[in-house]
Amino acid sequence: MIFTRLTFVLLLSISIPVVAQDSLSSLSLEQARELGRENSRFLREDNTNVQDPKKPPKANLTDYKKTLYPLLQKSCLACHGPDRSEGRLRVDQLDPNLLTGEHVGQWKEVYNALGNSEMPPADEPEFALADKDRGLLVEWVGAELEKAYHVRKNSQEYSSFRRMTRYEYNYALQDLLGFPFDMVERLPPDTVSDDGFQNRSELLQMSAMQFQTSRQIGLKALQRTTVHGEQPTPVVYRFPLEAEMNRLTSAANAKVFNQNDENYRQTRNNNHFLNKQTGKAINYNGGNFKPDSNAVVGAAPADSPVRLSLGAGKELKFNLDRFLPDDGIMRVRIRAARSNMNPELFANLRLTFSAHTSNNANFSQVISHHDLAVAAPAESPEYIDFFISLGDIQRNPFRKLETTFPRRDEFLHIRNVSNGNRGPEPLTVLIDHIEISAPFYAQWPPQSHRDIFFESANSQNEDVYASEVLKVFMARAWRRTVTDQEVGQFVSLFKEYRPDFGSFEQAMQEVLATVIASPEFLYLTTANGSPQDAKDKTISDLELATRLSFFLWSSIPDVELLGVAYKGELRKPDVLEAQIERMLEDERANRFAEQFVGQWLGLEGLDNVTHVKDGTLRDSMHEEPIAFFREVLAGNDSVMDFIHSDYVVVNEKLAGHYRIGNVYGPHFRRVPVAASVNRGGVLTQAAMLSMNSDGTDSHPLKRGIWMLERILQDPPPPPPPNVPEVDLADPRILQMTLKERIEDHRNKPACKSCHAKIDPWGIAFENYDAVGSFRTQLKNGPVDASAELFNKQQLDGIMGLKRYLLTDRQDQFARAIAEKMTTYAIGRSLSFSDNADIDKIVVQFRKQGDGLRDLIHVIAQSDIFNAK
Amino acid sequence: MSMKSISTSRRQFLQGSGIALSLPWLETFADAEKVPEKTPRRFLSVYHPDGVGLPLKNDPAWKDWSWFPRGGERDFQLTKVLDVLEPLRSEITIYSGLSHPAVRQVHGHSNADQYLTGAATGGHGAYKNSISLDQVYANHIGEKTRHASLVMSTNGGVGGPRGAQTQSFNKEGRPIPAMNRPKQIFDMLFVTSGNDAAARLARSKSSLDLLIEHTRSLGRKLSAKDQQTLQQYMDAVRDTEVKLAKAQRWIDTPVPVVDQSNLKLDADPKEARLYFQTMYELIYLAFLSDSTRSATFQLGRENGEGPHDLLSKAVGLGGAHGLTHAVKRPKGWENLGTYNRYQAMEFGKFVQKLKDTKEPNGDGNMLDNTFAMHGSASSSFHLSRNYPIISAGGKNMGFDNGRYLKFGTGNEDNQAGAGIDTDAGWRGKIEAEELPLANLFVTVLQRLGVETDTFAGYSGTLERV
């Protein structure tokens, strides 16, 4: 089998130039993928001669002299020449080399005037330009402008010295201080680069506002993670469920029922109390509670036969009155179990917080970061703990009023997000214990405090102890060893501050806040050795540790990684490999998947999508490419899986959207799919298709641009200003299909040169509508997804597109993803001189079999990653 | 988004090629620059909840008690509701046909939140607001005065989401607590502050000094190029130091001494007239002493409840909110109109006072350098459209007063939504086309000297203003 396929592939590869389109189009995508690999330039033995696809472009002066200047002479020179120079423009004096010449600005104006048919003036027929000639001119100027743009951009050298991004600062604070809550809401968003990345050194600015805000956030974070004085007494609520049930059932006219009633199936999804011994039940949707001053946090619940049954999609609403503290962590502990273990059904808990202060003045807000699954069987319920930072959620501003209006109460809602209300035996959540406590501390002082204010024999001698604390904290925050002199500076600051504060810890909080306002924390530095190693172009082991951790964790290194680097062992190949593997297995590597995939594919575009009304579906769309990336990463599968895979990674919601059966629950998992499902890879994921739509229909132009920018790393030139809109008032145009409209637009000379390169890529996706559903019919006829690329290559719909990418563009995609991941890893733009390094990376990881995990290792070992 | 990144790159490219982009605000900004620089420009917004009376034309009350004027731009006639402003006719402008598009179908009870922000604050669920007009200006000019802004309301504090008791929201869209006790406001403005602020400033100063020293030594280890990047950090720290020094200067500057004879600092909203006059007097004194140049004042909360409701006692009527519900009762329109007339009268007195006071530090009178607006985000009953707005002053900034400016189409006589007194009204279909109030805000900001062309996502200024 393998033999025959290989022979087939070899035969084909030899005869490619003469092979007709039809025989290629009969290839399966698997065959196409093998054939494409055979075609790789990067995999040839003599790949030293790999043609650099990005060699510096040259100005096209030959065509200018031969064809274009004569046209300009004929149509423009009379007014823009030696005799008259209207608008101070002399066409005869324009330097036709846009790459190095000084007239690029004037050429831009020429481009606009010609592109918009403003020049030559319509009332001067003797100077008119034929459409064909205008097209030639616009195309040439456009191409030269584009080259000029890249050359001027890429001739710069970039440095990896940069400040942390907003999200990195957030994670770095979390990891440094051991406080898993978001703290950077007040920081302004970072500038996104042309190709979607947020961590570009040249775009990460610092301003007084940015600095001050970071400083305040840092101090506040320290004040939350370190403590002083006695442990505050927590407010504790324990809902007396059994008493509550008894109160309800003993009321006059109580509508008591029994789980053995015949119609229990019909009503059981309503929230109700259930006594599992007697079967007695009564509906219940929540109640009013006050703190229980005798309750002990975390005490085991009393044994009781009473369960609170929470139906699928239902919620319980508890009025907590006005007693929750302003700040600190609130733990909501729920002991819960599933009513049955049917694997097709799931139940997750979600918390919402609300207040209704007066008529029409209300709010409600989801406060749990993630839904938590109820997994335990009915006979052995388990604790489910939510941790909420009370100072960070919307609170009822009237809670401290002396009077009772506006209303002061705050409400906690517990919702069961579930698909459980179906089948003969629906799934509900059985709750037998609810305890709320705030501020919650697992221990006192909390671990985050002990990590900074560790035990020391010197803790009574404040100055000595301050110096010990600072030395450890500074080394961790600054990711390097610190000198006694540096520590001494901060100890002096402590001594100055100390009299202002009641406790050692409070004064130290302010000193530590200064440590993390320093550029040594806020910036990723690449030179802290001695002056003599300024000539050494390689970063130090400690800097390598930082670079690795920002690459894979979006944050500072942990103690282990710093330790290995400190001992000088990080560059031993087996140690480096082991550390990378350890980091990828760590939970923090999820940030890499989220950030890299989000920025690479531009998933923030989904935030602007308003036509996907179902919030759960939109969230699932956003998660899918990230989950898919994780899947490929976990198995070190080929990056070509991004082009096409014979599996998808979906949850129940998306599976429903894609019409794939038998997928249950909100978690993402790998599901094999047949070709007939028309999915696999990232191109056909709903996120890409939806965000590259216009709200009602597919948008081939957006999809084409997205393909070129994100997948092929061949961004189209910027559109000319004042591009003529497609005129929908024109009845001729209104009657056209979208594809016809695009073709009509493309046939205008000013538009042709760009659109011919963009549109076909998008038209191949026409079988997917505005939310990414597959379709074969439009209102007025069958879908036409056939397109012809600029190079005359025919693409027959998505299968044709994928097949062509796999046979002919594997190298281009491999290089694109390698380049994008490298630029993300080092946090800077690339210049021409980096191309050789990137090529080396591509050759190596392609040789190893295109594995995504291999790519990460290859990048980490590369010269470019290890260079200053 | 991919499309966005393209345009960014083009703009960067254009700038790189030395082509200047002309932005629309430049022109207006140039006009505003004619005011001598040291003359302060001030902004005030007074907000009253619950809207105004808009009877139907066939209602006998229409003639006297419909809030909007009749007639044309210059030759408008005021009804009894606003006739108290007749003596100030040449100093005021009245607007119709303006509203914030995002909330045109939201219940009027939630309106105080979005009047100065234009945010889509909605009717239920998660809540998010955005920066208010006064705070945009305060961020621009705030460092010139001891207080960046003065935020007042009768009820004080922030209120609840969709039940705001403040008109001011910061850059992150969070409410800024309003002050409501005259004594407390007076102390803040005109009584020396404590030592705590000074100690905090001193600590910051030491911290910044250490960071600067440390950053210098880091810089010596960096390449020339990276030193440039680090210089940005250094500049940011230095700018912060400058800000601290300014704050220090305010601590060291004695607070202004003002004439307290018109102040009744223990006034309570129950004594509506006294309270009103005292609060307006505090704004006047804050402006006169140049303690701030941006102020907001909210007359209580939508939906009755609290001190605001008592203000209508000033004209011998019951709860203010109740007046809007009772318009179909005998004398209903007249009662509501009488209360609105009283609000306009107090505003008028304040405007007159600014007009009568010579600008302490510049040309003309204080009114000519102050843009003061008075309005509500409801017109008829709970209806979040066609906001009734009056502005006064601002002559030196380019405001041409003495006009009734109608905007939008389909509601020339202000009858859309008129005469309603049930909730069917505010839910109803949008019949008339109105312009975004944000366009007026952009005009105001530009004339105050803020370089912007958008507010709350809406671009452009309002024509004819």
Image: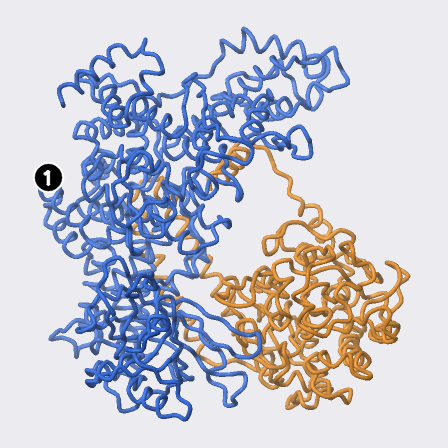
Chain colours: A blue, B orange
Looking at the rendered structure, the number of numbered marks drawn on it comes to: 1
State left or right for residue A779 relative to residue A184: right
Q: Which residue is drawn at 45% across and 23% down?
A: A787
Give the vertical position of A273 relative to A791 (above or below): below
Residue A181 at what x, y percent from top left?
32, 64
Extreme residue toward the right, this view: B75
The quarter in which the N terminus of chain A is drawn is top left
The quarter in which the C terminus of chain A is drawn is top left
Q: What residue is pinned by disc 1?
A: A573
Residue A608 at what x, y percent from top left?
49, 49
> Dividing the picture into quarters, in which one does residue A493 lie?
bottom left
Q: Nearer the viewer, residue B10 or A635?
A: A635
User: Given the image, on which type of amino acid does mark 1 rest?
Assistant: Pro
Extreme residue toward the front, this view: A262
Extreme residue toward the top, this view: A66
Give the vertical position of A385 relative to B214 (above or below): below
Residue A761 at what x, y percent from top left?
43, 28
> Dividing the picture into quarters, in which one does residue A138 lie?
top right
State left or right for residue B215 relative to residue A178: right
State left or right for residue B303 relative to residue B277: left
Give the vertical position of A326 relative to A638 (above or below): below
Q: Is mark 1 on a helix, strand or loop?
A: helix
Q: Residue at x 58, y 76 (%)?
A: B165
Tell me which chain the residue with mark 1 is part of.
Answer: A
Residue A866 visible in this rendered orientation of the protein: no
Dot 1: within a 10 Å radius of its alpha carbon, few (fewer than 14), some, or many (20 or more) residues?
A: few
Residue A179 at what x, y percent from top left?
28, 66
Residue B225 visible in this rendered orientation of the protein: yes
